[in-house]
Image: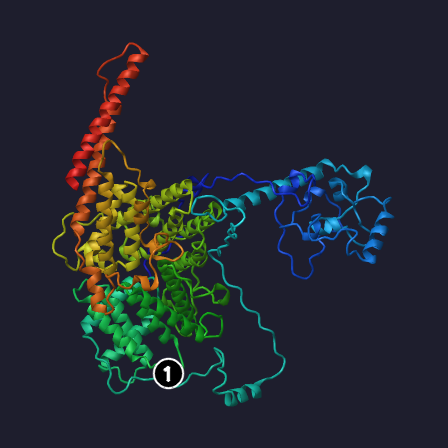
Amino acid sequence: MQPSHFRGNQGYDLPPVQSVTSGAFPAPALLSAPPSRPDSGMRMSHLLQPMPPAVPATSPYQRFYDSASGSPAETTLPDAPPMNSVPGLYQSSPGHGQTAAQLQQKRAYRQRRKDPSCDACRERKVKCDASESSSCTECNNRRVRCQFTKETNRRMSSIKQVQDLEKQLQNTKQQLQHLQTGMMRPDRMVDVDEGVPQPMVKLPEIEYRPVRRSKAPIPQDFSDVRSNLRRYGRGILKVPTPYRQQGAQSLVTGDAPELPPKTLADHLLAQYFNCIHTVLPVLHWPIFIAEYEKVYRSGTLLGVSNEWAAVLFGVFACGAIHTNEANREEEGKKYVRTSCGIIDVWHDNFNLDRARASLLASIFLYEVNSRSASWVWIGSAVRVAQEIGLHIDSGPWPAVEGEMRRRLWWGLYAWDRLLALEMGKPVLINDQDCDIDLPCPVDEQYITEGGKIPDSQQTTPLLATIHVVRSIGQLTHTLRSATISPATLETFELHFNTCLATFPSQFHPKTDQDLDPRSLAPVIYLQNARLLLHRHNISPFCPDMVRTSAMDYCVSTALDTSNILARCMRNYLTHPGPPCVNDPRSHFASCASSLLCTHIWRCSLLLLFRAEYAGALACVQALSSIGDVRTVNAACGRYLAFFLRHLLARLRPTEGHVADLERDEEMMAYVSGDMQGTSDGSWVWHGSETGSQLQGMGNSTPTSSSHRAEIETDVEWEGWEWIEKTVHDLFTEQHQQQQQHQQMAYGPPKLEASSSSTTTLTSESASDTDGRLSSAHSRMTIASII
C-alpha cells in the first residue's frame, strides 16, 4: 500500500533560476566578419543575420532564393565565401586558358548592359549577369535572393520595414545566444569560431504518454504461414512478444537452498516493503505474499521456478541491508549469492521474474557500495526486459500481468536513470525505443484478475519518481558540455518545479510539517538532480560570474534539503541512548539509501564552504545518525573530516588576511567532491599519470572484496562525533558574532555628536572597534576548534 503522502496534487514555488543566473553570461562583443570580396560595401544588416543551415552535397551552386519579393535585409550570409567569388583566387586571367564558351558568355553578358541589375548587385555596385530563367552568379555565390524591383517601388512600406527590423532583431538575439552558449576555453575566453552552441533542450511533459506505434491492417489470413514459421523457423527466428509461446519453466530440483526462519523472513519482507517496494513496486505484493506463504507452509523450494526463488532471495538481501543488524551486509551478500546462483544461465526463455531478480541484485550491490557491479546488473535487467518486450505496448494482456509489465519496466527505467546520473554514465534506455504507457496510480490490492482497474488521479511515489527521472536522459547529455547556458538551466528548473507541483504539500521546502523518512526518496531524487545540474557550472572552464551564480543555486538547493532533513529528525533525542527498534535515529538509518547519503554529503560540503553552518549541522547530524549502517556513509565521513581540516586551516586568520574560498582553486576542487570522478565533469586529472605510469606509484587498490571493504572503512579519521562537534562550534561562533554585530549596530550611542564630522568619526571608530573584537574572537574560537 502506498504512503498516504502521495495523494495530493498541490505544488509550490521555488526561487526562479534567473535570480542566480541573470547576467551570468556576459555577451562578448560581436566581431565584424570580413566581406566576401574587397570593397564590397556590406551593410551591418547583413552581418547580423544568422548562418544558413548546412547545404546538401548535391551541388555547390544550389539556389537559395525564392520567387517572392523581399528586402535585401532578409538575406543571409554563407559560412565562407566560395573560392570563385574572390578575385584573384583560383581564377584564370582573361588571356590564359579561357575557352571560347567563356568568351562568348562574356560577350553575351556585355551585350545585355542595357538590362537592369538585380537589387543585391545594384546595392553592391557589381556586375550582374542574371537572365530571365536563372539568377546571377554573384547571388548564387552569396546564396541570396536574386530579385528585381521597379525603381518606383524600391522603398518598402512602413509595415514591411518594421517587419524586417523585427526579423533582424530576432536573428541578432539568436546569434547572441549562440555566442553566450559557446564553448568556454580554460582561459575563460569564449571561442566564437570553435564554440558549439547547445541545442535547445526539450523535456517531456508530466502527463506525456508515448505515441503508440501504428500497425497496418492485414487483409489476408496468415494462419498457415504462422504455423509453418513456428515449425520450420525454430532455431532461426524467435516469435515476437506476445505471440511467443511460453517454454518449459526451469524448476528448483535436487539441492534446494535453505530458507531462513519464518520470523526473520517476515522481518526482511517488512523492511523491503517499507524501504523499497513503496517507491519501486515491481512486485504484485498480494500475489507474492501468497506464493511466499505457500512455500513456507511446504517448508522447501522444491518445485518452485528458479526465477521466482531468485526473486525471493533478492527480496531477502534488499530487506537485510535495510536493517540495523551488525551482520546485515554479510547476511545480504549470502542471500544475493543464493539468488544469483539459482538462476539457470542456460535457460533461454526469460520472464518477468528474471528481470526482477537482476534489478534486485543491482539495488543490493549499490547499497553495499559495489557501484560498478550494480551498473552491470542493471544492464542485464534492462536487456532481459527488452528481450521480453516490456518497453513496447503489446498485448492484450491480463489485467495483473499488463500492469506489472508496466510497473517493472518503469522501475527499471527509473533505476537506470538514477545510476547513470550518480555515476556519470550514459543511460541504457533510449526514450525513442519505448511506447509503453505509464503505470496506473492505484495500489496493487485493487488490481485483480478479471477486475477493472479503478480510475484515480492521485500521484504515487513511482509516478513522482518517473516524472523526475524522465529528464535525466537530457540532463546526462547536458552535463557533457563545458558550460550550461541560462536558457538550459531555466528549462530544467521549469520541469523540476512542475514535478514538485505533483508532490504533496508537506514536501515544500518552506513548510514546517513533519516528514516520514520512508517517503523521502522521490523528493531526494529531485533535489539531487537539481544540485548536480547547477554544480556542473562551478568548474574552472566557466567564467567567475557563472561559477558564483552556480554556487549560489547549489547552496539554495542544499538549504532546502537541510530543511527537509530537519523536519525528519527534529523529534529525535539530543543525546540518544543505546540503539533500539523504536529509536527514531535507528529508524532513519535503516530507511536511508546510499543515494541519500551521497546527496546529504554533497550538501554538507557546499554549506560548509559557504559558511551556512546551521544547514550544515542538520546535514551532518543526519549523516551521523546513519553512521556505519551504509558503507558509503563511512567514506563520506572520512572525506568530510578531511574537508573540515582544510577548511579550518583556511579560516585561520593570518596577518589580517581574509580567505576568499571561491578564489581558492584547491578548495573549489575539494568542494566539487565526486564531480572529479566523472569523465565529463572532472578537471584535476588533466595532465596526470596514465597507463603504465600509474604502476609503481604504490597505494594500489586491493582486488578482494574483504580487502576493499577494509580499505574503505578502516582508514583512521576523527569520527562522526568530532565532525558534529566541530560544525556545532562553527555554528555557535557564527551565531555569537552575529549577535555582537547586532549589538554594535543597534545599541544606544554613547555620545551625541553636534556635527556631522564628529558623527562620521564616531561611526568609523565604532566600526574599527567592532572589527578588532570580531577578529580577536574569531582567532580564539577557530584556534580552540583546531
The residue type indicated by label 1 comes to His
Where is residue 784 drawn, in percent x and y? 15, 39
Where is residue 662 drawn, in percent x and y? 33, 41
Quarter of the view holding residue 325 = bottom left
Horizontal relation, residue 662 to residue 87: left or right: left
Q: Where's the N terminus, which quadrant?
A: bottom left
| Extreme-top residue of the structure | 754
From this view, report whether residue 20 is shown above or below residue 313: above
Residue 459 seen in the current view: no
Q: Residue under circle 1?
A: 347
| Extreme-left residue of the structure | 578
Quarter of the view holding residue 737 = top left
Where is residue 121 drawn, in percent x and y? 76, 44
Quarter of the view holding residue 96 = bottom right
Which of 95 and 636 lies nearest the eye of the viewer? 95
Local packing at callout 1 (Cα closer than 10 Å; few below 14, some 14-19, many 20+) is few
Looking at the image, what colour scheme do you see? rainbow
Horizontal relation, residue 340 to residue 161: left or right: left
Where is residue 159 drawn, in percent x and y? 71, 38
Residue 702 seen in the current view: yes
Q: Residue at x 26, y 75 (%)?
A: 337
Horizontal relation, residue 30 to residue 102: left or right: left
Which of 17 and 756 lies nearest the eye of the viewer? 756
Horizontal relation, residue 3 to residue 750: left or right: right
Disc 1 on helix, strand or loop? loop
From this view, report whether residue 359 is shown above or below residue 527: below
Q: Residue at x 52, y 53 (%)?
A: 199
Q: Where's the C terminus, which quadrant?
A: top left
Which of 752 and 775 lies nearest the eye of the viewer? 775
From this view, report whether residue 46 is shown above or below residue 636: above
Which of 437 and 641 lies nearest the eye of the viewer? 641
